[in-house]
Amino acid sequence: MRDNSEYPELPEQNNYQEAKEISRHRWSKAAFAIISLSLLSILGYGIFFTSGILNEPSSKEEASFITILQPVQGSRLDMTWSVNVIGEAGGFADTEIIVQALDASGNVLAEQKTFFDPPESNTDQKITWSVDLRISTEPGTQGQIVAIAISTLDGGIFATDIIDVGYGETPLDEELFTMEDHFWRLLSLKDSSPIEDTQLDLQFDNFQASGSGGCNLFNTSYERKGNSLIFGLITSTAKECELPEGIMKQEAGYFDSLEQTAGYRLEGDRLVFLDPDGEALLVYAAVVRGDIRSTDSGRLPEQALVLVSLNDVSRAEAPSSIVAEQVIQDATLFPISYSIQYNPREIVADHRYTIGVRIEDRSGNLFFINPGTQQVITWGNPSQVDLTVEAIR
């Protein structure tokens, strides 16, 4: 074998080895740069992902929503018929909406399903959904209405909404009460009693509501479905009352509360209007009201007692029964204003009711009585009635 160690390397070999070494060095640097850039990219993506900049699924998730619009928070639901639950949803597709009525222990009393179907798969488009729940439980039960948006692909929950409700009393009680059949006097405005000697009231007739704000008369439209109640824009007369002090501010607050009303419930003998959060705005009592006048110039006795009664006179062969009464003390002059408060649950649609008046002294001696039978409330009769009394000779 020939030993080439004694022969010097050819110039071409030196150039080749040098080029090879330079090339290897450059590839090492390039590989290092590529690896470094890759690591930086991975690290940067992680930072963006954690900060939410590139977390697209999370942003969509935050945009997903479902809301119960009807009934409103705190409603008492009438179980005579199916309860209509209405809401809005948006921010997702391929979704099943489950609506449940629960009792206070979480037991499912009723359940219905519907599907979210945004137009042309546009998940940014919100839709209105509606289901009917046939609920059966003991009257007076407390519970919740729950709406859940669930993915039909993996069963994941997109969004939920929950409201607290009560389940109604017996169907008979519900059938006996109709808001439109009564005249309502305001007892409380946002937990405050009306200013003394001011009369704020409300009555309903043919989708129109009207009444007094204490100074001005007003009128508005209204829509009622289930336990939801919405009033339109209020129009009123344009008087400016100076007395009692604060009456105009009270009236403005009354009109504003009516326009904020989103629902109602009956609590005992009180009608309560609710804001969108289910908080009480206005509290009313059902009344028959008017003025008592005299046919002559007869004088009232000293320390007179004016006894006004609401009577059920439905049974022809039986004495009338007193439904409610008011005692007015120390009246001195005619006319005498009366306002007799009653429980609307006790009024039966096909019964007949009258107002009776007796004016006595403190010893029980009778001085005045109304001779006729003025019918009120049912059979198309009014709840605002002026009465005329005659002196006992």
Image (cartoon, grey):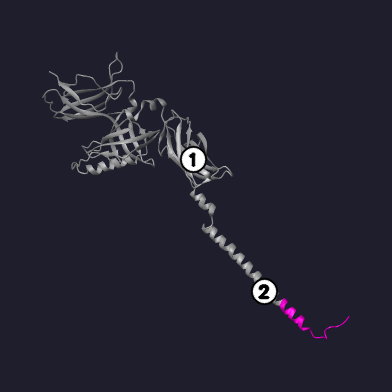
Outermost top residue: 317
In reply to whether residue 330 is colored magenta, the answer given is no
**Magenta-colored span:** 1-20
Q: Which of marks 2 and 1 is nearer the N terminus?
A: 2
Report crowding for label 2: few under 14, some 14 to 19, many 20 or more residues within 10 A (C-alpha): few
Mark 1 = which residue?
A: 147
As shown in the figure, which amino acid type bears the numbered disc 2?
Arg
- What residue would you read off at disc 2? 26
**Going 64% across and 67% down the picture, which residue do you hit?**
35
Residue at (26% x, 43% y) in the render? 252
Residue 286 place in picture, x, y as percent: 29, 30
Packing grade of label 1 (10 A; few <14, some 14-19, many >=20) is many
Q: Check disc 1 and report its element: helix, strand or loop.
A: strand
Quadrant assignment for the C terminus: top left
Q: How far apart are marks 2 and 1 (CA)?
A: 64 Å
| Among the 4 quarters of the image, the one containing residue 332 | top left
Q: What element carries label 2?
A: helix
The quarter of the picture where the N terminus appears is bottom right
Rendered location of residue 48, percent (x, y): 54, 60
Q: Is residue 325 above or below residue 42?
A: above
In the rendered image, is residue 201 in sight?
A: no
Task: Using the image, determine if residue 182 lies above or below residue 64.
Answer: above
The amino acid sitting under disc 1 is Ala
